[in-house]
Amino acid sequence: MKKYLVIGNPIEHSLSPKLHNYWLDKNKIDGNYDKKLLTERKIGEFLKSNQNISGINVTVPFKKTILNYCTELTELASSSQSVNTIVLSNDKIIGDNTDIYGFEQSLKDLNFDGLNKTAFILGAGGVVSSVVIALNNLGVKKIVISNRTKNKAEALAKEYNLVVSDWGKTVDFDIVINCTSIGLKSNDKLGLDFSNIKNKIFYDIIYRPKTKFLIGAEGLGNQIIDGKMMFLYQAQKSFEIWHGIKPEINEEVTNLLND
Ligand code: ATR
């Protein structure tokens, strides 16, 4: 039986095992997908002592740290400097990125057209480079980034040609994407004033619970998108990379995330 797992910290909340085990079962693949809580110090040791694992998903906060342990990177992993999918074969540790596909596909589903559009990104954590690359693929004209710790936004701005805005201020945008972790806890508040904004797109990478950011935007008549489809598409792509089969995303699969 082939072994797969997701590593992160925290990891308890991860729905990846449920989803991948469902698809493994549906596709009659002899495999098992587990989760493992790790600390940064333990990553190297874990990889050395678990050479019977065939694939790993990497989540917060290791998507960048893991680059140091990969023996090879795909072009997407290299351009984003972010790895969420690893293929282990022989002595190779190949880092790949399916977050870019996940984010891009979730917007393509909704016929999003980036032409002449401005995107406003909140946050500068591990997922942002993937979001930026996907937005560029979708043809957006301008990307503005804002983060509490400004130098992290500035570093990304330099790398990907973005405009930096001070944290707490809002700018003109067609789509705003919350890439911060604010909203994971139910009393979390972003503290940005979007009260005059209508008919725009509000996207939250977080898929559970529905964030105040999305609830407020919806109340004002904006289109809202949560992180569910991005999560499903990145998982679908990882599955395809490991097993050579594109698993189906249907209502039954989407419902797995709701229970
Ligand atoms: P990483 O990938 O770096 O481990 P992450 O959890 O993906 O981190 O990202 C956390 C993001 O949420 C960061 O942009 C963080 O801002 P800082 O860079 O200033 O830390 C942002 N964030 C988390 N809590 C926040 C808060 N209370 N106010 C503002 N931004 C916050």
Image (cartoon, rainbow, N blue to C red):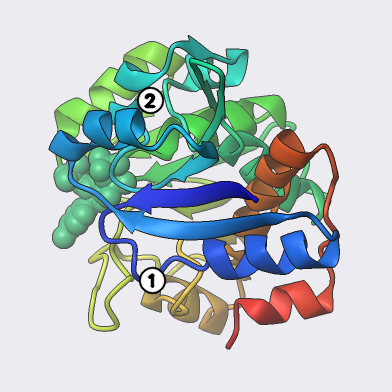
Seen from the viewer's position, the closer of residues 2 and 42 is 2
Label 1: which residue? 13
146 lies left or right of 58 = left
Which amino acid lies under the numbered mark 1 shown in the image of this protein? His
- Dot 2: within a 10 Å radius of its alpha carbon, few (fewer than 14), some, or many (20 or more) residues? some
Q: Which mark is residue 163?
A: 2
Q: Residue at 38% across / 25% down in the picture?
A: 163
Res. 110 in view? yes
1 lies left or right of 206 = right
Q: Which mark is residue 227?
A: none
- The kind of secondary structure element at disc 2 is strand
Q: Quarter of the image holding residue 161?
A: top left
- Dot 1: within a 10 Å radius of its alpha carbon, few (fewer than 14), some, or many (20 or more) residues? few
Going from N to C along the chain, the mark reached first, 2 or 1, is 1
**x and y, in percent, of residue 229 in the image:** 67, 60
Seen from the viewer's position, the closer of residues 54 and 117 is 54
Q: Residue at 25% across / 22% down in the picture?
A: 154
**x and y, in percent, of residue 105 in the image:** 74, 45
**x and y, in percent, of residue 216 in the image:** 44, 79
Which amino acid lies under the numbered mark 2 shown in the image of this protein? Val
Q: Residue at 60% across / 84% down in the picture?
A: 258
Res. 168 in view? no
- The kind of secondary structure element at disc 1 is loop
Q: Quadrant of the C terminus?
A: bottom right
Among all residues in the image, which is located at the extreme bottom? 259
- Distance from the alpha carbon under mark 2 to that under mark 1: 34 Å
Q: Nearer the viewer, mark 2 or mark 1?
A: 1
Seen from the viewer's position, the closer of residues 31 and 165 is 31
Q: Residue at 61% across / 37% down in the picture?
A: 98
